[in-house]
Amino acid sequence: MQTFAQIITKIVDFFYRPFRKYIPQQLFRYAACGGGNMVLDWVLYFILYNFVVGHDLVYITLPLHFTPSTLHHSICLTPHILTFLIVFPITLLTGFWLNRNITFTQSSLRGYKQLWRYILIVMVNLLVNYFGLKLFVEVCGIYPTPSKMIITILTVIISFFGQKYFSFKK
């Protein structure tokens, strides 16, 4: 895996050359890895949604044991949410791997500690997305797409500094 990380790093650094006067290398690597992971997310989502999960509702039955007789509870998942639930852990792990092995390579923290901190920053960003969309769309009356764009800029900033100074700190 280390050789694979070195290959990716060399490719990213090759494209960094024209930008080296304008942005730090670590920030460029972060943007390249994040962009690559975002494309992976989109491609996986498209493939799984259209060719694996399908377009039908999915019902999951869970047994509940409150009494001697077994009660069942069904959960209905829409295909787009089920696809998200499948893709999210994959891109969470690939994002962590890219950040750990390409962007923030100088951290002295142990891997499991980095992973838990990384997951915490991702969860913070999920909350910022949720409440930010609620605020901008439902309270301020801003259209959803520009609201999402504004929130994405905010979460990228939160994520970069959270990963640099918390998840992968030196």
Image: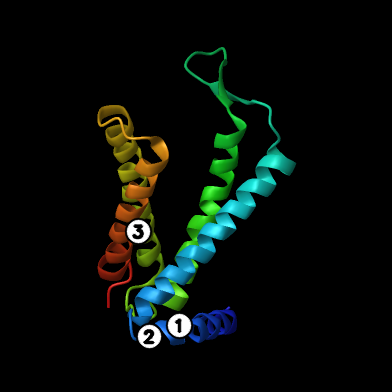
Q: Is residue 48 above or below residue 78?
A: below
**Observer-nearest of 18 and 63:** 18
Alpha-carbon span between mark 3 and mark 2? 20 Å
Q: Residue at x 66, y 41 (%)?
A: 49
Q: Is residue 123 visible?
A: no
Q: Quadrant of the C terminus?
A: bottom left
**Could you tell me residue 78's position as x and y percent?**
58, 29
Disc 2 is placed on an element classified as loop
In-image side of 97 versus 147 (left or right)? right
Marker disc for residue 156: 3
Marker disc for residue 26: none
- Name the amino acid type tagged 1: Tyr
Alpha-carbon span between mark 2 and mark 1? 6 Å
- Name the amino acid type tagged 2: Arg
Q: Residue at x 30, y 60 (%)?
A: 157
- Name the amino acid type tagged 3: Val
Q: Residue at x 32, y 42 (%)?
A: 127
Q: Are marks 2 and 1 in contact (CB under 8 Å)?
A: yes
Q: Is residue 45 above or below residue 114?
A: above
Q: Residue at x 29, y 36 (%)?
A: 136
The local crowd at label 2, few if under 14, some if 14 to 19, many if 20 or more residues have their Cα within 10 Å, is: few
Q: Quadrant of the N terminus?
A: bottom right
The local crowd at label 1, few if under 14, some if 14 to 19, many if 20 or more residues have their Cα within 10 Å, is: some
Find disc 1 in the rendering and name its residue. Answer: 16
The image quadrant of residue 21 is bottom left
Find disc 2 in the rendering and name its residue. Answer: 20
**Observer-nearest of 106 and 157:** 157
**Observer-nearest of 110 and 107:** 107
Disc nearer the start of the sequence (1/3): 1
Disc 3 is placed on an element classified as helix
Q: Is residue 155 visible?
A: yes
